[in-house]
Image (spheres, rainbow, N blue to C red):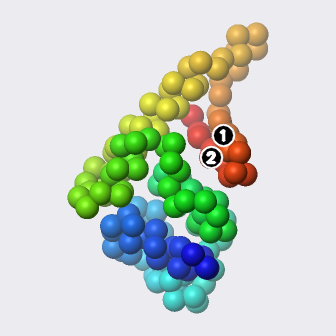
Amino acid sequence: MEDFISRFRYLINNLEISNSRFADELGVQRSSISHIISGRNKPGFDFIEKIVNTYPQVNADWLITGRGSVFISNFGEKTANTYNSGTSPSGEERSFELEKEKDAVMSRNVDTIHDKHHDKSIETVIVLYKDGSFREFYH
């Protein structure tokens, strides 16, 4: 897709939710969505960060630059199927499923990494992909 606005519209349509619901899930004013779609405002880093934190399956690199695919393919087969099928759960069910999956991934990864020598806990895990994109997971 050529520009951010096109990708932004495509994302909302692909998630199969209304602009209002999208704004509510991000915790932003509904007018900010319409202002971005109309081209009146450009999204800042905080706004894009809210998108990828709310929808961790979204490929931030694609959203910002148009490179790669819309969704992170290795985020989980269940997530990929949820958004590519003709039937999708409600926003609440989707959010709950994503949180459960994200928690499971974080628990698996964080539990296997522990600094026994310094009694430190992990705050953030950053995954770097070969295509130059990355994901941050917060514990």
Placement of 43 over or under 82, stated as above or below: below
Local crowd size for mark 2, using a 10 Å CA cut-off: few (<14), some (14–19), many (≥20): some
Q: Quadrant of residue 61?
A: bottom right
Q: For residue 64, which quarter of the picture?
A: bottom right
User: SS for tag 2?
Assistant: strand
Contact, mark 1 vs mark 2 (Cβ under 8 Å): yes
Q: Is residue 67 visible?
A: yes
Residue position marked by numbered label 1 in the rendering: 127
* Quadrant containing the C terminus in the rendered view: top right
Residue receiving disc 2: 135
Left or right position of 139 against 131: left
State which quarter of the image contains the N terminus. bottom right
**Badge 1 local density, few (<14 within 10 Å), some, or many (20+)?**
few
Left or right, residue 117 beside residue 34: right
Q: Position of residue 73 (x, y in %)?
A: 50, 48
Q: Which mark is residue 97?
A: none
- 79 left or right, relative to 132: left
Distance from Cα at disc 1 to Cα at disc 2: 5 Å
